């Protein structure tokens, strides 16, 4: 009987030892495979993340370029409106008796130019404020309607504030002087 136990023990020991070796090798090989799979997954995700970063950089650059273009066009519009206001101010304050044909021609040219600039980049709110201002100025220039300097400046300020809003500047500017 003792021999049976020895043989059974030897069989169990040889099978258990082999199983232990197989389990150890499987664990080691599984660890290597897991590391490789994890590295592959990381590489794939890193590549995707880099692609997303590049897309985001492109979008940021486009947005920044669009903002600068809009700002440049708004500067041009402000210069045009300033020329119009200069002429209107001179007549409304009595420095001139009326508008000369060349002033009327410049008014027409500049208001159409400004309209084109604004329509290229602006939101509807800016366009509406510009149209309100020009609709107020047209009868003053062409029909001799009287208007105070304060009324004209208020219309211009409303348009400027709409532009500021369009540029992401939330606070409004108001004329707080005495003239």
Image: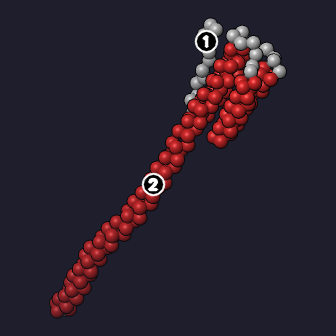
Specify whether residue 30 is in view: yes
Residue 169 relative to residue 155: left or right? left
Residue 38 relative to residue 155: left or right? left
Disc on res. 101: none
Label 2 crowd bin: few (<14), some (14–19), many (20+), radius 10 Å: few
Residue under the image location 70 percent in, 18 percent down: 88
Mark 1 vs mark 2: give the one in front. Answer: 1
Residue 61 relative to residue 1: left or right? right
Specify whether residue 165 is in view: no
Q: Is residue 84 above or below residue 33?
A: above
SS at mark 1 in the image: loop
- Front-lying residue, 7 or 145: 145
Residue under the image location 21 percent in, 84 percent down: 13
Q: Which residue is mark 2?
A: 54
- Front-lying residue, 124 or 150: 150
Question: Which quarter of the rendered picture does the N terminus lie within?
Answer: bottom left
Label 1 crowd bin: few (<14), some (14–19), many (20+), radius 10 Å: few
The percent coordinates of residue 153 (x first, y second) are 67, 18
Residue under the image location 46 percent in, 50 percent down: 57
The percent coordinates of residue 86 (x first, y second) are 65, 19
- In which image quadrant can residue 147 be found? top right
Question: Which quarter of the rendered picture does the C terminus lie within?
Answer: top right
Are circles 1 and 2 on residues that touch, CB within 8 Å?
A: no
The total of numbered circles placed on residues is 2
The percent coordinates of residue 143 (x first, y second) are 83, 21
Q: Which residue is mark 1?
A: 176
């Amino acid at each position: 009987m003792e021999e049976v136990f020895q043989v059974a023990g030897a069989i169990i020991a040889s099978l258990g030892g082999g199983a232990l070796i197989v389990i150890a090798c499987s664990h080691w090989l599984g660890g290597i495979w897991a590391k490789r799979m994890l590295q592959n997954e990381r590489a794939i995700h890193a590549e995707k993340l880099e692609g997303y970063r590049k897309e985001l950089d492109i979008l940021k650059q486009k947005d920044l370029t669009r903002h600068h273009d809009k700002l440049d066009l708004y500067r041009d519009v402000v210069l045009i409106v300033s020329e119009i206001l200069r002429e209107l101010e001179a007549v409304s304050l009595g420095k001139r008796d009326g508008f000369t044909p060349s002033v009327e021609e410049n008014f027409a040219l500049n208001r159409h130019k400004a309209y084109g600039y604004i329509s290229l980049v602006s939101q509807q709110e800016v366009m509406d404020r510009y149209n309100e201002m020009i609709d107020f100025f047209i009868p003053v220039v062409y029909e001799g309607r009287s208007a105070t300097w304060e009324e004209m400046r208020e219309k211009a300020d409303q348009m400027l504030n709409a532009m500021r809003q369009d540029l992401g500047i939330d606070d409004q500017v108001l004329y707080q002087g005495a003239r």
